[in-house]
Amino acid sequence: MSTQGSLPGFDEAIPTDRLFLAIFPDATYAARLETFAARHLAARRMDGKPVGAGRLHVTLFHLGDYTEMPPRLVAQAAEALAHLDADPFTVRFDQIGSFNHRSSHGDFVLTSGDGNEALHAFRQQLAVHLNAAALNQYTKGSFTPHMTLAYNQPAMPFQPIEPVVWPAHEVVLVHSLLGKTRHIRVADKRLHG
């Protein structure tokens, strides 16, 4: 993360850019997931719109928020991605709700009670390449696979649903313009099998 000191009389710089690695459903599955999200929002009488199909994703690694994108980090992450050699796998979610359901609002997400071993193994394989590219500070911490369907909704505890299953065929290095709902593909790697 960008850490800049502040001087008296000057506000701390507000990050405008985010860098992350994620898997995205293909266009067909993304459209289905957006429709699924709209249906579940309506069924729960939640206002707001679902995340657009082109932005639905599962974040694998958050590489930080910045006031300007650090070119060396971008190059290192793209290099790690280029060395990845993995097969496609299936993502499975069987719960819907909010992680912070005890507060009044939260993000409305899909997640799973267990499983997704292939996703966890894939993430671990990607972590090896990130570590080799000297990015091990980003591979620490826990990982709860989830897909955000809508932001800032009335919070609710997780509820079981019929499993939502989709194939993961690529991983993408994304530059997100914070607050502008825009993702820029910096690099990607097709999974083969």
Image (cartoon, rainbow, N blue to C red):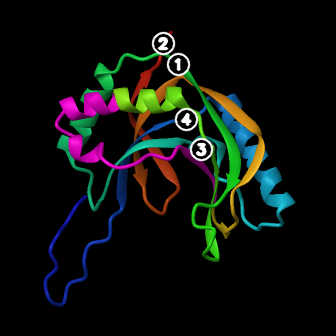
Percent position of residue 129, x then y: 27, 28
Q: CA distance from mark 1 to mark 4?
A: 12 Å
Residues at circles 2 and 1 in contact by the CB criterion of under 8 Å: yes
Q: Amino acid at mark 4?
A: Phe
**Left or right: 28 in relation to 24:** right
**Residue labelled with disc 2:** 192
Closer to us: 63 or 111:
111
Q: CA distance from mark 2 to mark 4?
A: 15 Å
Please give the label number shown on residue 56. Answer: 3
Q: Amino acid at mark 2?
A: His
Residues at circles 2 and 3 in contact by the CB criterion of under 8 Å: no
Residues at circles 1 and 3 in contact by the CB criterion of under 8 Å: no
Q: Could you classify mark 1 by the number of other residues whose Cα lies within 10 Å: few (under 14), some (14-19), or many (20 or more)?
A: some
**Left or right: 171 in relation to 159:** left
Q: Amino acid at mark 1?
A: Pro
Q: CA distance from mark 1 to mark 3?
A: 18 Å
Total count of labels: 4
Q: Amino acid at mark 3?
A: Leu
